[in-house]
Image (cartoon, rainbow, N blue to C red):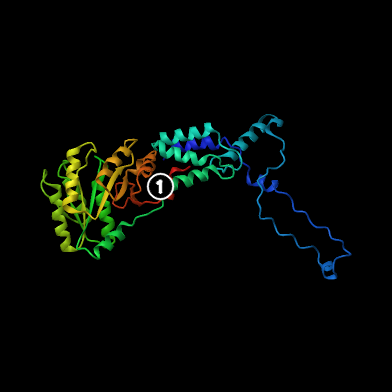
Amino acid sequence: MFGFLKQKVKEVLDKVKVPSKEEKKKGEPKEKKKVVSEEKLPQKALKEESLPKAPASKVESFSTREPTATAKSKPGAEASTEKMREKEKKGFGFSLFSKKLSEKDLEELKIGLVRANMSYEAAEKIVEALRDTEKKAADEVLREQLIELLGTERFDLVKFVKDRMKTQKAVTILFFGFNGAGKTTTIAKIGHLLKKNGVPVVFAAGDTFRAAAIEQLSAHAKNLGIEIVKHKYGGDPAAVIFDAKKHAEKIHGVVLGDTAGRLHTDKGLMEELKKVMRVNSPDFKILVMDSLTGSDIVTQLENFSAIGFDGLIFTKVEINEKGGSIFSVRQHTDKPILFLGTGQGYGDLMEFDPEKIVEKLDL
């Protein structure tokens, strides 16, 4: 994943000369031993074979060692081999200690981030944080900024449901999002998770618009052993979810309500979604987003924000080659990211973890 972004960051970091651990150690000043006259030493000290060593200095020096013979002074193949070894030592991922990245380097990195589907504002924020990092490794700063951008807040959906069920007969969670984002499959995954944690689940087939949507959710319900409430195609989605709530109250369970995928530009379908919310007052509203979406994902987010949602789930992360869209969304909302869909299996649902997401960038 993220091959292009990794290569771009590598090109930037490779331009900087970095001292190795051996160079750091050899650059440190040697300890000077105190010379004490034998006549002034007490008899006890004279019997000992050596004086105790002074404690090592805690201050680490980054000065480099004296230059030795370079590849230029070596003949033929030996010089070429030495050059290759030096190039390998530089590698990728070393820290930066003293040399400042040039404006050209920073601009190239920003372009790389934007081309990885990250929004311009998010890329600019990261690049700004990389300026004037003479004593701090640029790769570490980049990692810290990415984690900070994602946020460290986590939301435990299972705990939320169980807490609500202490005071309510039923809990309703509504799922909505763009066409083809993977809402129905995501509902099946959440149903599997809740059932595994001892929560009774009822599916509500509220997508009465898309062909085969009801059959798809019904198949998941059968596979998972979960009850489902459904009406005919063309029916009122608000009524389907309302009936599912009534049934869930009898078993003291949670309703997972499916809805039709909709374009944020389709005012009719957006109004229908508002009606579903008014009639059923869901306890939690989840916006499902396709992580493969490009720059339009911010526009989608803003339009669905006007309706209101409580959390996000990103799908298709397993085939996402860049992933910048996740960072772009976090730049524009403080709503928690709950899960990442990582496959087609019911268990392919990864809890949101900023550090793991940044690790996947392989910077």
Residue 206 visible in the current orientation = no
**Residue 116 % position (x, y):** 41, 36
**Residue 208 % position (x, y):** 14, 44
Quadrant into which the N terminus falls: top left
Q: Amino acid at mark 1?
A: Leu
Q: How many marks?
A: 1
**Residue 56 % position (x, y):** 70, 57
Q: Give 169 or 193, whichever is nearer the viewer.
A: 169
**Rendered residue at 19%/63% (across/down):** 169
Q: Give 137 or 350, whichever is nearer the viewer.
A: 137
**Rendered residue at 19%/43% (across/down):** 260
From the viewer's perspective, tell me whether residue 202 is left or right of residue 322.
Answer: left
Q: Is residue 267 above or below residue 245?
A: above
**Rendered residue at 52%/43% (across/down):** 139
Q: Residue furthest bottom?
A: 44
Q: Quadrant of residue 179?
A: top left
Q: Is residue 171 above or below residue 21?
A: below
**Rendered residue at 34%/55% (across/down):** 155
Q: Residue furthest right?
A: 39
Q: Which secondary structure, mark 1?
A: helix
Q: Quadrant of residue 18?
A: top right
Q: Residue furthest front?
A: 306
Q: Give 35 or 299, whichever is nearer the viewer.
A: 299
Q: Return the residue at label 1.
A: 150
